[in-house]
Structures are given as C-alpha cells and as structure tokens.
Image: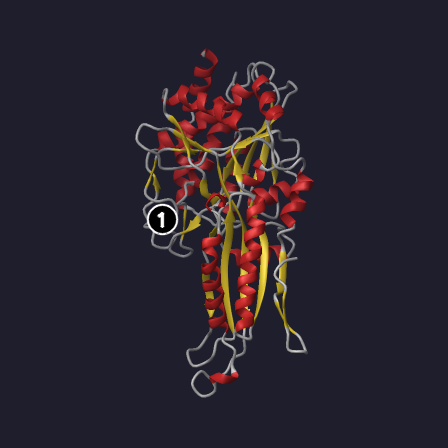
C-alpha cells in the first residue's frame, strides 16, 4: 500500500502538466492521419522527459519504451490523437469543424502524465519487464475517402491507427495492452468496464446509372439515385432477420446523388459500416447487405461498385485485467466506484488489439454531454484525466510487481481470438472487396457477385 501511495503521489505531481496538455490539444483538434501538430506537441514533451521515440514517420504517432532493467512482460499503455468532426459544437475548429467531442485530448494528456510519473525516481522500484507508451492516430473511423486516398498512395494499408500500428509491427513483443477512454458515468462512479463492443467493416458503395434529361427523356436514363434508395430500402427490409445478440448495425449516408436537378443522376455514392458483435456475424451480415445492394441495382438496370475494407475487430475486455484495474481505481476513488457496463454497439480499434493479446478499454467519468455531440466536454479533469493516469500507473505496477505474477496470470489465461498477428491480418484482409456486383450477360440473364 505504501508503494501504491507513492505512485499515486508521483502522478499527482504531474497534474499541471496533464491539464495544460489537455487544454492545448482541445484547442488544436485534428482528424485521423492528420494529427501532425498534436503528435509533434507530444513528441517534444516526451523527449523533454528523456524518452527516445520511435516515430511512425509518414503518419502521425509514435511509441517509447521504458525498461525496468529486469526481464519480464511488456505492457503497452495507449492514448489516441485524433478528433471528430462536429460542426455545430461551440469549440469546433471554424475551418475544419474538428473538435475532440470524444475526449481523445484527455487520453493524450493522460498518456503524457503516465510518461512523466514513470520517470520519477523510484517509480519502477520492485517492477520487472517493460512498458511501451503509444500515441496512436486515427481511431475515429471517419473521412473514409481521405483514408482510401492514403491507402492508394501506399502510405497506409488500414484505415484504423491501431490496426496500422499492428501491421507495421509496433505491437510486436507486447504482451498486454490497456488504455482508458473518456466517458459520462453516474455520479459517484469512477470507471465502467464492459464486456466489450462491436466491430465493423467499412463500405464505400457507388451506384452507377446512365444520365439523361430528367424532363425531356427520362426513359433513356438509368437512375443511380433510385437504385441507391432501392438498395437502402432492401437492407432495411432485412433488419428483422438480424439476430438481436449479434448487435448488427447498418447506418448509411448518401454522399453524392446527382449534380443537376434536370438530369437523371448517373452516380450515387453511399458510405456506411456493417457493425456486429463477432467477426463471424460481421462477415455473414455484410454478405447479406451486399446481396441486397446488388439486387437493387439490377432491378433498376444499374450497377453498383462495392468497396469493402476491414474496419475494426470486436473488442473483448480481458476479465483478469478488469479485476486488476478495478482494484487500482478503487484504491484511488474508493470501494464501489467501478461498475461493469453492458456490451457496447460502437466500435474501437482497441478491439483489433484485443484480437491478438489480452487488452482492456474501459471508460472513466468526468465528461458531460453526449459523446460525438455538440455538448460534449471533459468537465472535471480530476475525474477525467488525473484519476485515469493514476489508475493506469497503478495497474501497470500491480501487473509487474512480484516478478510480474499477475501479468503472467493474465497472459497465461488469456484467450485472444487469433493465435498470431499474421492469422489476424489474414482474417481481416478477407473482408476486403472491390468490384462491380452486377454483370449483364448477352443472353439476357443477370449475374450478381457480392462476395469474394
């Protein structure tokens, strides 16, 4: 208990540093794979603390290792760099509409506070193994067209920052991963740990028709907008076939639907995800969605190009890690302040990390408003920044003390979905598809191809 109190005091000494970082990053929001200013700010702070950084290079983000000097497991502690786009938030950037309406500015500040505390004299006493501090870009799965452009240029392979970091080998050698996300909890509660949350596949859908004069010769056209609306209605008609426990979500937006009111729309573009609670359900229902989209396009004499890419793997929080983190947070905030939340139907690329190693991604208190909404703020930095930083440091210490007995138990009893990074990457790559789904044959028949 004495060492725990010392560690908590070491983090508390960083409160001003944490708060200044949170305020600075809040005022300079940047969306995924564009977080150059945020990453540079944190890089300078980390180097001032004496860390040697491994920079991602052609994308924002970095990591730094801290070795205890004794052999043992490697624990990764993560923070996210990117913001959202919420144009009607009072603090949104007037040029980009970017704002940290999900609290990632707090996560980055938390990570900096953890880094500073672990450099305090005596912070690593009694610990073995090492800690990897990771500042990761692009968690929010937005601006898919921009990310597809990066992918086509060979800058990234995957849309999510942690998925890209896994692909690049930045998680190689890591045994356990953890982070704490901002959130809104009931009064008196400090942390919520759910069983996990959905994963998803990303979808860029382009309906292709034939333009003609909308008033003079509509019979010569093939209306891509009507094909798109038929496709979305067809998917809606499938919803009663979605099994409740699979937590399937399909929520499209139409991003293009013609250019002039007096012309039959030649192109209609739709962006969406298919979310689900398991990899198998995502694969299964995405195929059904694609079948509906292809059939709708064919019914209008149009075609549809379906461009699918892996989004995020479902998150499964490790139960042993949940127990250790519960003990840590209750040491800080008191007994009964940690709750077990329900399954979440949102997505995070922390799920991809949990697919290959024991991981945990709970939510802290301190925020107000609606996440991703115009009224979201981290209002209480003690609850939303300081306590999570203390919790992460104390959890790491609990895992790596006593010859890392508890970390070794976590690793030994963990059951990630995949046995290796290579198996995981091959599986998510199987979701990738880019093809026109409708073939009009010379004999008048139509062939639909809606999966690989």
Identify whether 367 is placed above or below 320. Answer: below
Quarter of the image for the N terminus: give it.
Answer: top left
Estimate the x, y position of residue 4 in percent, counting from the top left: 46, 16
Rendering quarter of residue 64: top right
Name the residue that disc number 1 marks. 373
Residue at 32% over, 43% down? 369
Identify whether 395 is placed above or below 82. Answer: above
Residue furthest to the bottom in view is 216
Residue at 62% over, 50% down? 156
Residue at 32% over, 37% down? 379
Between 196 and 150, the one lying in front of the other is 196
Residue 247 lies left or right of residue 170; in this view the side is: left
Label count reads 1
Estimate the x, y position of residue 409 in percent, counting from the top left: 59, 21
Quarter of the image for the C terminus: give it.
Answer: bottom right
Residue 38 lies left or right of residue 446; in this view the side is: left
Estimate the x, y position of residue 24 in percent, counting from the top left: 41, 41
**Residue 159 shows in the view:** no
Rendering quarter of residue 110: top left
Estimate the x, y position of residue 118 in percent, counting from the top left: 52, 24
Residue furthest to the front in view is 241
Which secondary structure, mark 1?
Answer: loop
Q: Callout 1 environment at 10 Å: few (<14), some (14 to 19), or many (20+)?
A: some
**Residue 445 shows in the view:** yes
The colouring scheme, among rainbow, by chain, secondary structure or one colour, is secondary structure
């Amino acid at each position: 208990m004495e060492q725990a109190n010392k560690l908590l005091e070491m983090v508390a000494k960083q409160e001003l540093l944490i708060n200044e970082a949170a305020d600075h990053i809040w005022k300079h929001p940047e969306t995924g794979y564009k977080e150059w200013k945020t990453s540079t700010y944190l890089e300078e702070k980390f180097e001032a603390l004496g860390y040697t950084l491994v920079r991602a290079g052609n994308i924002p983000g970095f990591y730094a290792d801290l070795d205890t000097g004794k052999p043992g497991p490697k624990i990764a502690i993560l923070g996210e760099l990117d913001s959202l786009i919420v144009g009607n938030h009072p603090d949104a950037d007037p040029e980009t509409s970017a704002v940290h309406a999900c609290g990632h500015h707090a996560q980055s500040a938390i990570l900096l506070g953890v880094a500073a505390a672990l450099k305090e004299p005596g912070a690593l006493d009694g610990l073995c193994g090492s800690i990897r501090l990771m500042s990761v870009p692009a968690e929010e799965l937005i601006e898919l067209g921009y990310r597809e452009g990066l992918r086509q240029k060979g800058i990234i392979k995957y849309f999510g920052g942690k998925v890209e970091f896994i692909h690049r080998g930045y998680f190689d050698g890591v045994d356990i991963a953890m982070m704490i996300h901002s959130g809104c909890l009931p009064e008196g509660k400090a942390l919520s740990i759910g069983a996990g949350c959905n994963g998803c596949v990303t979808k860029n859908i382009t309906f292709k028709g034939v333009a003609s004069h909308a008033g003079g010769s509509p019979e010569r056209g093939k209306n891509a907008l009507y094909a798109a609306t038929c496709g979305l209605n067809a998917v809606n008609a499938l919803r009663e076939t979605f099994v409740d426990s699979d937590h399937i979500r399909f929520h499209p937006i139409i991003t293009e639907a013609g250019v002039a009111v007096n012309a039959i729309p030649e192109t209609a573009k739709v962006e969406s995800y298919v979310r689900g609670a398991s990899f198998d359900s995502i694969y299964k229902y995405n195929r059904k969605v694609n079948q509906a989209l292809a059939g709708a396009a064919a019914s209008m004499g149009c075609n549809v190009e379906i461009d699918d890419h892996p989004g995020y793997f479902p998150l499964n929080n490790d139960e042993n890690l949940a127990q250790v983190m519960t003990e840590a947070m209750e040491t800080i905030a008191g007994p009964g302040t940690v709750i077990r939340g329900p399954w979440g139907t949102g997505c995070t690329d922390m799920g991809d990390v949990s697919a290959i190693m024991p991981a945990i991604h709970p939510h802290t208190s301190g925020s107000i408003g609606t996440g991703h909404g115009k009224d979201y703020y981290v209002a209480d930095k003690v609850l939303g920044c300081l306590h999570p930083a203390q919790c992460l440091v104390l959890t790491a210490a609990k895992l790596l003390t006593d010859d890392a007995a508890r970390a070794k138990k976590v690793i030994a009893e963990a059951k990630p979905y995949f046995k290796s990074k290579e198996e995981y990457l091959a599986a998510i790559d199987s979701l990738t598809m880019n093809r026109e789904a409708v073939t009009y044959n010379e004999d008048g028949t139509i062939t639909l191809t809606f999966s690989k």
